[in-house]
Amino acid sequence: MRLGVLGGTFDPPHVGHLLAASDAFETLALDRLLFIPAAAHPFKGDSVGATPEQRVDMLALLIAGDVRFGIDTIEIERSGLSYTVDTLADLARRYPDAERFFLIGEDLVDQVATWRAPERLTQLAEIIVLARGDAPQSAAGQFRRLNTRRVDVSSTEIRARARAGLSLHGFVPDPVVAYIRDAGLYR
């Protein structure tokens, strides 16, 4: 089994996450890709706006009906700060025969060395750098680079648009737009 792992706060999850996951799924010939929402992110502090449960609900709406993808709440169940090495170790125990691929954005490459037990990460999964196809190539170091399509959208921008009362259509699927609106998120 070839297992992809895409972690993040997903606050909110958006079409950029979905397209990057699709590109990785196809290019790496994955059997399954798990979205793993963080309970708390060690580098983001209190900047998360939706609750963990709301972020899981929005992820479910984002991937609804796509059998390639699943959601694993391992980090939310663990609670507290989430460390990638702990999550990958747990997944290695749960999927001992799987070939694991940990997907990160190009913006995180320089931070990996500061993460908890960075030397152990590559023992637990192959790190794949999701790079925007037309962006200048960064130093991916020892990690494999996977070009994905360029989608200029971010969760930060979506939260700002929601606060300003602007349309979110096209940034997130319509069921996620409705969820954000009905839950009064990011106002």
Image (cartoon, rainbow, N blue to C red):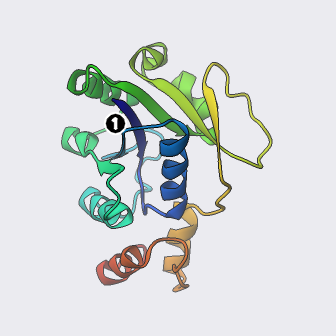
Locate the C terminus and report the quarter of the image it occupies.
bottom left
Q: Nearer the viewer, residue 24 or 161?
A: 24
Is 28 placed above or below 92 here? below
Residue 38 image position (x, y, % from top left): 34, 45
Disc 1: which residue: 82
Is 167 placed above or below 78 here? below
Q: Nearer the viewer, residue 163 or 145?
A: 145
Is 122 placed above or below 146 here? above
Q: Is residue 89 left or right of residue 102?
A: left
Q: Is residue 172 left or right of residue 50?
A: right
Please state the total of marks drawn on the protein image. Answer: 1
- Amino acid at circle 1: Ser
Q: What residue sits 42% from the left and 56% below the top? A: 10
Q: Nearer the viewer, residue 49 or 120?
A: 120
Q: What residue sits 67% from the left and 28% below the top? A: 140
Mark 1 neighbour class, 10 Å CA radius: few under 14, some 14 to 19, many 20 or more? many
Residue 136 image position (x, y, % from top left): 80, 42
Q: Is residue 29 left or right of residue 179?
A: right
Locate the N terminus and report the quarter of the image it occupies.
top left
Q: What residue sits 55% from the left and 48% below the top? A: 23
Q: Nearer the viewer, residue 180 or 49?
A: 180
Residue 176 image position (x, y, % from top left): 38, 73
Q: Tell me the quarter of the picture where residue 125 sits.
A: top left
Look at the numbered disc 1 and give the secondary structure of its residue.
loop
